[in-house]
Image (tube, rainbow, N blue to C red):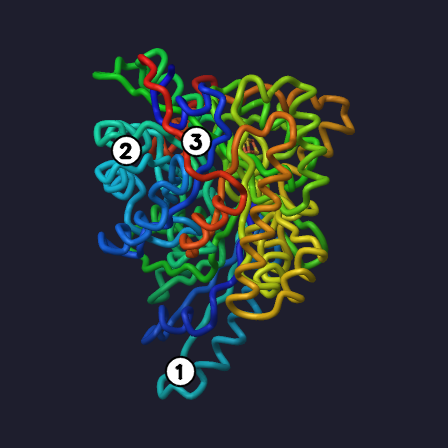
Amino acid sequence: MIVAERKPMVEILASIQGVSRLLVVGCETCVAVCLAGGAKEVAVLSAALRLALRERTSAVEILERSVERQCEEEFNAPLAEDIAKVEAVLSMACGVGVQTLAEQFPDAIIYPALNTQFMGRPEAPGIWAERCLGCGDCVLGRFGGICPITRCSKSLLNGPCGGSSNGRCEVDPEHLECAWQLIYDRLARLGQLERLYAIEPPKDWRSAHDGGPRRTTREDLRL
Amino acid sequence: MKSGSRLERLLWAGHFVVTAELGPPKGPDVAAVERKMSLLAGACDAVNVTDNQTAIVRLSSAATCALLHQHGIEPVMQMTCRDRNRLAMQSDIFGAVALGVRNLLCLSGDHQKFGNHPSAKNVYDLDSIQMIQMVKRLRDEGLTAGGDPVEGAVPLFIGGAANPFGDPFEMRVIRLAKKVAAGADFIQTQCVFDLPRFKEWMRRVVDLGLHEKVAILAGVMPLKSAGAGRYINANVPGITVPEAIIERLSRAGRGAKAREEGMRLCAETIQELRTIAGVRGVHIMAVEWEEAIRPIAEMAGLLPRPEPPEVAP
Ligand code: SF4
Ligand code: SF4
């Protein structure tokens, strides 16, 4: 899923300064699952904003909504009426959702309430961790299902750097496992250690963001 | 001859070689480079010049190497994958060769989080093994990574690093084998304090015959005090200084006495390394302590340094 976390309150307050009618819109997909921007978080943030803004001379009106998937226009269509009533929209979706609202409602002012972080998964209650950088040419099959591009701090494709120690990554031993220890252990378990002798060629980064913003076309699905 | 570098010719002639390290200043302070050069001249065969070591911005390795070359000291240019993509690497390599550099050490590089620009974006377009492969292709096939012909020759003696003390241990020999397959001509290892583990690693290296394909220079580091040893154990992943060494240093006393003992310990390590099959030289890393190189080489019986034979490239 896409993992995000809420921006600090001061930053959110600064972005909506002077706004007296506000719409807070959550998204019920990834960011709801990672407890950052679903209906519940919309209610919590709205309550916090009301509290923070109660001293203002003019009253602040906050509308609370959440949609199924903010990255798809059809789910956002019913928001049109509310958006027309407010001065600004605070989106609690990931960056894709925020941009979808901005594209779909060109006259509305949209602010992000979350920092979109990564594609990852929950590792333990309250902990989410990055798993994929979306390089566009998946090599997981050669690395025992562990992504060296994402999980090695240096994206090394041919084995560990000199800093791998006791299974931890030198960059942050307390929190990070060394991806190459994981790859080694998994390949050993699968009886595929011979894979480690092959020199992995330089990656063709054109399929990643380095080739420019990406798009996918499926001719069979085009109208 | 691949490069005709002094280092390559000395190894070719069968000498036990000595390399040292010079950390460039944190700015274009040529006098500082010259001061360090005078400490190293004649005390070793070639001098590694670090590339923004520990991710701290310094005078560029290529420029410092050119200064060394002008003063008749043979440089080994270090280049990391952290700061350059394949375009910048090749262009800087051409520049260094044009200025007289003949040895290149290809490294992954320390992560920028350890340095003085932790908010920087890193590159890691290639890893060190892919860099070695690219440089070999520049040299032997005259082709860039993109496949275009190179104008002019790229006579480089290609080096890589190895850490026999990192984990996973089995991976350490595999990685060396990959560096050799990629085209490494010489290897400089992480500092050896734990001799038994180093010997175990070398035994596997020799079993695989890798020592015949690549010249292995064992890394050593003189310690200034017992505290320096404890600091390494607490802060440097992948190196362990055994208790016995720390104890000897602390028994030696403080200040100059401890430093003297540190140099002696280092010289003893070198003498022991010399007896290990497959070890072709030593790389002395005296970080910000270039004064120590000459006395250590002297104590280890490595002075004067030999002149390499003139070999037609
Ligand atoms: S190889 Fe690429 S697509 Fe596959 S997990 Fe890693 S970053 Fe994602
Ligand atoms: S310690 Fe492991 S994960 Fe960290 S940079 Fe080195 S190889 Fe990559």
Q: Are marks 1 and 3 in contact (CB under 8 Å)?
A: no
Task: Determine the CA span between mark 3 and mark 2.
Answer: 15 Å
In what element is the residue under mark 3?
loop
Residue assigned mark 1: A59
| In-front residue for pair A58/B161 | B161
Seen in the image, is A85 located left or right of residue B207?
A: left
- Residue drawn at x 24%, y 40% is B71
Q: Which mark is residue B92?
A: 2
Q: Are marks 1 and 2 in contact (CB under 8 Å)?
A: no
Which image quarter has ligand 1? top right
- Residue under disc 1 on the same chain as residue under disc 3: no
- Residue drawn at x 33%, y 32% is B89
Identify residue type, mark 3.
Answer: Leu
The chain holding disc 1 is A
Residue assigned mark 3: B126
In what element is the residue under mark 2?
helix
Within 10 angstroms of label 1, few (less than 14), some, or many (20 or more) residues?
few
